[in-house]
Image (spheres, grey):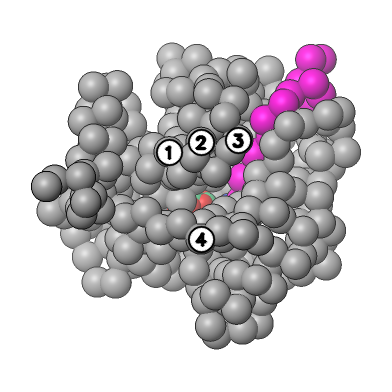
C-alpha cells in the first residue's frame, strides 16, 4: 500500500561538533520518502526551486519515489541552517528560508486523492490542511511538526491536529504544544487535541507511544557514534509509516513493531550527514538492527 507524503525538500547547512556541511540535500519530505521507500511505494508532494539539481531528483527516483507531485517553481529551494552542540538531541535553528514554499499550493496528481496512508511531514500546517482537504478516505493520517510552527502557526496547527490519527513529534515539542512541563500530563493534553495516538521522539533515549489506554516505550539502537542527527525524526517516521502501510496492521502490536523499524531507520541516518547513509543501507542491515533492538529490552526470555 503506497503512502502520500507532503513535506519539505531542502538544502540544509548543518554544523555538529564533528564537522559541517553547506547546502546538502535535506528536508522532512526527502528523509521521510527515502526511509519509507525501503518498505513500500511513496508519493511525494512538495516544491523545489529552479536551483535544485537533477541528481537529487535522480536519487529519489532510484529509490522508486513517485515524483509526479513534486513541482518545480521559479525561485529558490527551501533552505534550513542548524547547529547541534554536544547534546545532539537538540537542534538549534539558525536560519529558515521558506522560499518557494511561501507561495506553494499543493495540487494532488490524479489518483493521489485515494491514498490510504497519508503522512503530513513537518511543513506549514496550512499546507498540511490543503493536502488533507484533497484526500478522500484515508485509513491513517499521521503528522509531524516542530517548534517553528507550534509558535508561528498555532491556530492552523490545531485545525490540522483535529483531523489526524497519529502525531509524531519530539519531547520538547510535546511540552511546548501542551504548555505543560510534565511529559505524561502533556501527552494527555495533546491527545485531547485530536490524535488518538501520540508518538514521542526522544533522540538517543528512544520513543514513547501514548494512546488513551496504553503506553509503550522503545529504546533507540545503541550507536557508538552519532555524527549528525538531522533528519532522524523524519527517517523514523518513514520507517514507522512505511512498515504500517506495508503490513496494513494498525493494531497496538503492529504499531509497536513499526516503531522499532522507525528507530532502526533513524539509527542509519544519524551516522552521516544528509541522506548519505540511506544511500548505502541494505535490507539485511535493517533486519540485523531490528533483531538487536528486539533483544535490548528482553529481560524474561533468556532463562
Ligand atoms: P528532523 O528529522 O527533525 O531532524 O528534521 C530535519 C529536516 O527538517 C531538515 O532536513 C530541514 O530541512 C527540515 N526543516 C527544518 N525546519 C523546517 C521547517 N520549518 N519546515 C519544514 N521543514 C523544516
Q: CA distance from mark 2 to mark 4?
A: 14 Å
| 231 to the left or right of 115 | left
Q: CA distance from mark 1 to mark 4?
A: 14 Å
Question: Counting other residues with Cα less than 10 Å from the Cα at mark 1, is it few (<14), some (14-19), or many (20 or more)?
Answer: some
Where 14 sits versus 121, above or below? below
Q: CA distance from mark 4 to mark 3?
A: 16 Å
Q: CA distance from mark 2 to mark 1?
A: 5 Å
Q: CA distance from mark 1 to mark 3?
A: 10 Å
Where 241 sits versus 247, above or below? below
Residue 254, numbered label: 2
Specify whether tag 4 is near ligand 1 (CB below 8 Å): no
Determine if residue 102 is in view: no
Q: Which residue is mark 1?
A: 257
Q: Which residue is mark 4?
A: 215
Q: Position of residue 125 (x, y in %)?
A: 75, 54
Q: Which residues are magenta?
A: 108-122
Q: Which residue is mark 3?
A: 250
Q: Position of residue 276 (x, y in %)?
A: 30, 35
Among the two numbered marks 1 and 4 on one chain, the one whose residue lies closer to the N terminus: 4
Amino acid at each position: 500500500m503506497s503512502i502520500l507524503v507532503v513535506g519539505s525538500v531542502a538544502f540544509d547547512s548543518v554544523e555538529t561538533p564533528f564537522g559541517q556541511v553547506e547546502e546538502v540535500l535535506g528536508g522532512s519530505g526527502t528523509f521521510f520518502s527515502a526511509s519509507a521507500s525501503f518498505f513500500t511505494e511513496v508519493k511525494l508532494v512538495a516544491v523545489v526551486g529552479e536551483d535544485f539539481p537533477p541528481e537529487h531528483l535522480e536519487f529519489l527516483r532510484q529509490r522508486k519515489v513517485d515524483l509526479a507531485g513534486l513541482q518545480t517553481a521559479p525561485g529558490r529551494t527551501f533552505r534550513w541552517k542548524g547547529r547541534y552542540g554536544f547534546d545532539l538531541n537538540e537542534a538549534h535553528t539558525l536560519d529558515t528560508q521558506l522560499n518557494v514554499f511561501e507561495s506553494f499550493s499543493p495540487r494532488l496528481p490524479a489518483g493521489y486523492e485515494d491514498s490510504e496512508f497519508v503522512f503530513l511531514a513537518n511543513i506549514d500546517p496550512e499546507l498540511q490542511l490543503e493536502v488533507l482537504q484533497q484526500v478522500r478516505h484515508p485509513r491513517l493520517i499521521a503528522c509531524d511538526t516542530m517548534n517553528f510552527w507550534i509558535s508561528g502557526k498555532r491556530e492552523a496547527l490545531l485545525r490540522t491536529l483535529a483531523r489526524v490519527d497519529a502525531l509524531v513529534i519530539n519531547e520538547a515539542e510535546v511540552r511546548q504544544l501542551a504548555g505543560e512541563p510534565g511529559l505524561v500530563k502533556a501527552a494527555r493534553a495533546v491527545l485531547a487535541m485530536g490524535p488518538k495516538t501520540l508518538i514521542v521522539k526522544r533522540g538517543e533515549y528512544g520513543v514513547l507511544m501514548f494512546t488513551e489506554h496504553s503506553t509503550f516505550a522503545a529504546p533507540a539502537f545503541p550507536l557508538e557514534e552519532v555524527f549528525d542527527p538531522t533528519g532522524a525524526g523524519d527517517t523514523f517516521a518513514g520507517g514507522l509509516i512505511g512498515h504500517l502501510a506495508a503490513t496494513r496492521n494498525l493494531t497496538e502490536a503492529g504499531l509497536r513493531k513499526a516503531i522499532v523499524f522507525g528507530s532502526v531507520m533513524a539509527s542509519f541516518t544519524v551516522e552521516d550527514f544528509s541522506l548519505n547513509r540511506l544511500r548505502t543501507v541494505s535490507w539485511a542491515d535493517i533486519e540485523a538492527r531490528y533483531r538487536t533492538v528486539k533483544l535490548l529490552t528482553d529481560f524474561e526470555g533468556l532463562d
